């Protein structure tokens, strides 16, 4: 538990399921007040709000597209009107689709970039402006991926978006450090969430993925949310501009495990 989080206000994007939902639940246990964003799954968002209230937090759900400027501003305004402030902004929403790059439509490209990268920019910009205007410290957590460093053929837009998130995180961490605003990213490996449900329901594909993980297992959303809670708290108060890999060792070049090379 991180006592300093008690009563603090956070916006979390993509909170209706998966990693976002797990982070919301974990921050509820820290007694935070949360604006839970969803894009289309209002039932999932309502479930998250209920889960937050049951776990000691307070929450409201808000429908918003992270790629839309007015919607993002609405999320910030909701935090201020419902809970009176903003302490933490988590850019978690993300999506992917598999397609060879030579067959990728501009629509495919723009969809992934606009949610994963532009959405991260818009959310960060809204939060930064609030803290600068009000002369307050703040904290941003961006959801990257191991594919901010591992190339991922047939997902080139996704890899480009997450590579962008990593450098955006570092850049704004530097830009706002003197104002007491910290910015970090979490880069999950293979985590058991709806984004992977189809893949992991096929034993062969599940096994293929596990072979890429030195720890030989798929991660849980709770293992990602524990990292988010630490980054949110003052226990990580001297950490900024970092990307923390929660990946069971996936980024450690597993092919070299037996001393090959
Ligand atoms: P998920 O599909 O379960 O959840 C993604 C969330 O993003 C959903 O709530 C969805 O509604 C939301 N979202 C999508 N487009 C949106 C939009 N335009 N506006 C608002 N919300 C939108 O996936 P997840 O695994 O929980 O992924 C969460 C984050 O973690 C993503 O950024 C993803 O890229 C990243 N990630 C996941 C894994 C993994 O293995 N699950 C690995 C690396 C990175």
Image (spheres, rainbow, N blue to C red):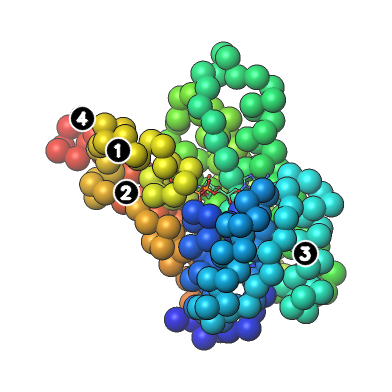
Of residue 157 and residue 32, the one placed in the foreground of this image is 32
User: Does the numbered disc 4 mark a residue whose Cβ is under 8 Å from ligand 1?
Assistant: no
Name the N-terminal-most of marks 2 and 1: 1
Image coordinates of residue 19 in percent, x first then y, are: 49, 56
Mark 2 lies on residue: 218
The residue at 65%/19% (across/down) is 105
Mark 4 lies on residue: 261
Label 1 crowd (10 A; few <14 / some 14-19 / many >=20) = some
Label 3 crowd (10 A; few <14 / some 14-19 / many >=20) = many
Q: Secondary structure at mark 3?
A: helix
Of residue 191 and residue 101, the one placed in the foreground of this image is 191
Cβ atoms at labels 2 and 1 below 8 Å apart: yes
Name the N-terminal-most of marks 3 and 2: 3
- Specify the farthest residue to the front: 43
Mark 1 lies on residue: 206
Image coordinates of residue 255 in percent, x first then y, are: 24, 34
Q: Secondary structure at mark 2?
A: loop
Alpha carbon distance from label 3 to label 1: 38 Å
Alpha carbon distance from label 1 to label 4: 27 Å
- Residue 114, by quadrant, is top right
The residue at 26%/31% (across/down) is 204
User: Residue 118, relative to residue 21: is it above or below?
Assistant: above
Of residue 240 and residue 115, the one placed in the foreground of this image is 115
Label 4 crowd (10 A; few <14 / some 14-19 / many >=20) = few
Alpha carbon distance from label 2 to label 4: 26 Å
Name the N-terminal-most of marks 2 and 4: 2
- The quadrant the N terminus occupies is bottom left
User: Residue 200, relative to residue 182: is it above or below?
Assistant: above
Which callout, 4 or 3, points to the residue nearer the camera? Answer: 3
Q: Which mark is residue 76?
A: 3
């Amino acid at each position: 538990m991180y006592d300093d989080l008690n009563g603090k206000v956070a916006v979390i994007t993509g909170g209706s399921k998966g990693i976002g939902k797990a982070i919301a639940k974990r921050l509820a246990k820290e007694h935070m007040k949360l604006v839970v964003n969803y894009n289309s799954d209002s039932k999932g968002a309502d479930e998250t709000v209920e889960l937050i209230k049951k776990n000691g937090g307070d929450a409201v759900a808000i429908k918003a597209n992270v790629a839309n400027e007015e919607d993002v501003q609405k999320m910030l305004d909701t935090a201020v009107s419902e809970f009176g402030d903003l302490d933490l902004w988590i850019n978690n929403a993300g999506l992917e689709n598999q397609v060879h790059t030579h067959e990728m439509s501009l629509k495919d490209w723009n969809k992934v970039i606009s949610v994963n990268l532009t959405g991260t920019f818009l959310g960060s910009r809204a939060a930064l402006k609030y803290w600068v205007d009000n002369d307050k410290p703040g904290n941003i957590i961006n959801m990257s991926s191991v594919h901010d460093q591992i190339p991922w053929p047939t997902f080139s837009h996704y890899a480009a978006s997450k590579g962008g998130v990593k450098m955006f995180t570092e850049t704004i961490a530097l830009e706002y450090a003197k104002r007491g605003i910290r910015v970090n990213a979490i880069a999950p490996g293979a985590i058991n969430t709806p984004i992977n449900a189809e893949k992991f329901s096929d034993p062969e594909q599940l096994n293929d993925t596990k072979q890429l993980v030195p720890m030989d297992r798929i991660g849980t959303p709770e293992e990602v949310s524990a990292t988010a809670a630490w980054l949110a708290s003052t226990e990580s108060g001297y950490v900024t501009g970092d990307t923390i890999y929660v990946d069971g060792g996936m980024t450690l070049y597993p092919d070299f495990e037996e001393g090959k090379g």
